[in-house]
Image: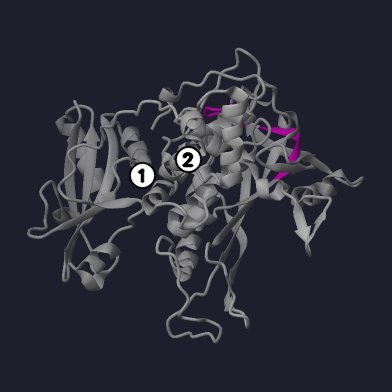
Amino acid sequence: MEKILHFYRRTEPDRLKEFVLDFEYCFNIEISDELNEEEMKILKWLLSETFEPHNFSDIPFLKGKVIEVGPRMNFETPYSTNAISIFHACGLKKVRRVERSRRYILKNDSPEIINLLYDRMTECIYPEPIKRFKIDFEPKEVRIIPLIEKGKTALKELNREMGLGMDSWDIDYYYDIFVNLFKRNPTDVECFQLAQANSEHSRHWFFKGRLMIDGKEIPSSLLDIIKKPLFSKTSNSLIAFRDNSSAIRGGPVKTIIPESPGKPSPFKDVEKTLHPVFTAETHNFPTGVAPFPGAETGTGGRIRDVQAVGRGGIVIAGTTGYCVGNLFISGYRLPWEDRRFKYPKNLASPLEIEIQASNGASDYGNKFGEPVIQGFTRSFGLKLPNGERREWIKPIMFTGGVGEIDEAHIKKFEPQKGMLIVMIGGPAYRIGIGGGSASSMISGAQSEELDFNAVQRGDAEMEQKVQRVIKACIEMGEKNPILSIHDQGAGGPCNVLTELVHPAGGKINLKKIRL
């Protein structure tokens, strides 16, 4: 029996006080069965403000024209993840999900003011109280894309419809493979998978392309140049260009580990050979569209890269950096800022990105337990004498991190028949299934709705739970059950699972992935 309970807590508005007449929180709680009297008492005690019991009720305080905003139903928030852990620890096992919405009575309910109340990427307006969290949908039938009959036009149409991020070279390439090599039509599922696994985001084609300087091609690609130090005689690199992170040679270290990893136990002294792990990446697209969640999942994704090296790595510390366009700070006019410059409507302003992205990266690191120990920021936008404009329109959100890996876990096992593929963590969303193509898009080249679908949602509490599992496995030493580990980033299962099972192949049950 699924049921939604509603409780209300009256308090000061968390923001935009100048526009708000009255404000309250609404706790929307999904339970699997009726709560008894004692369970209901505990639930109310956990939700209410200790010193203001008169401001808590199961009846709304606000009357009249109320505007309610909260998280989109298809996404369980980090707030819910954390609250559920607390409720279950207090014996409330019947509670399945908790989402907090905000209810306002405004002085002025103009559309401009209402739009300030919520983040349209991750939240929505509730036209009525929530009756259920579950969203009913039917999986679409697999479609055959008629390349043989309609030619490249069929693939171009699918590319626009699904936001696959294929350029003319991709379309020519896949057309040739299916029509001339396989001599059959592809399915939309195959096209989607190829768009993620072979996206610029996942494969870095530009780095491997022909490099021209002053109109002349040089013999090395950009990636060849980047790799050159690796092959020098003095290289101390242990992992490079073949895993989620890199590692350099470390040495013997005295440390402590639990006597019984994975459960409460005393610690013991051990001496291990540990190696430093380094990784860095950018989160430009999601941070540009939704700065706070984009940057927090930039940090979260990079943390997963440290975890998913060899047979498991341990996170230590991180760094961040931001490159944005002109800030146009109020009351702080700078001579090179041209206020006639136009900016894409689907991107946040450079100033908003600087503030919210910094907050998002720090917030995620704090909740996970990884300190951000250094960083940088750059703002640049200029009109050159010849009229050309140079500016970081699509922002750069840089995140780097350092960790450690045990000598015994440097090398992944080769995939073999009989091994099990296990996915742990939170549910998968549109970005987690197909973000590689979205991240590889030229800004403005797809619809805003596809941009919204591609915005990531950070859940540091869930990643911390995953960290505990991985760390317990690592602490088992030679008995570590992890044979090979990969992190599911923007390319999703289309990318991570194919890399994990290559070249042996594997059977993937997509319907078992929690959506």
Cβ atoms at labels 2 and 1 below 8 Å apart: no
Q: CA distance from mark 2 to mark 1?
A: 40 Å
Q: Secondary structure at mark 2?
A: helix
Q: From the top left corner, tell me how far across and down residue 274 is, in percent.
A: 75, 38
Residue at mark 1: 77
Q: Main secondary structure of the magenta part?
A: strand
Residue drawn at point x = 89 percent, y = 46 percent: 232
Q: Amino acid at mark 2?
A: Thr
Q: Is residue 285 above or below residue 494?
A: below
Q: Amino acid at mark 1?
A: Thr
Q: From the top left corner, tell me how far across and down residue 417 is, in percent.
A: 63, 13
Which picture quadrant has residue 290?
A: bottom left
Q: Is residue 351 left or right of residue 403?
A: left
Q: From the top left corner, tell me how far across and down residue 505 is, in percent.
A: 61, 20
Residue drawn at point x = 24 percent, y = 46 percent: 47
Q: Quadrant of the C terminus?
A: top left
Q: Which residues are magenta?
A: 261-277
Q: Is residue 51 left or right of residue 339?
A: left
Residue 383 visible, this orientation: yes
Residue at mark 2: 153
Judge by depth and name the residue closer to the eye, 304 or 156: 156
Q: Is residue 214 magenta?
A: no
Q: Is residue 348 above or below residue 93?
A: below
Q: Judge depth for marks 2 and 1 and give the one in front.
A: 2
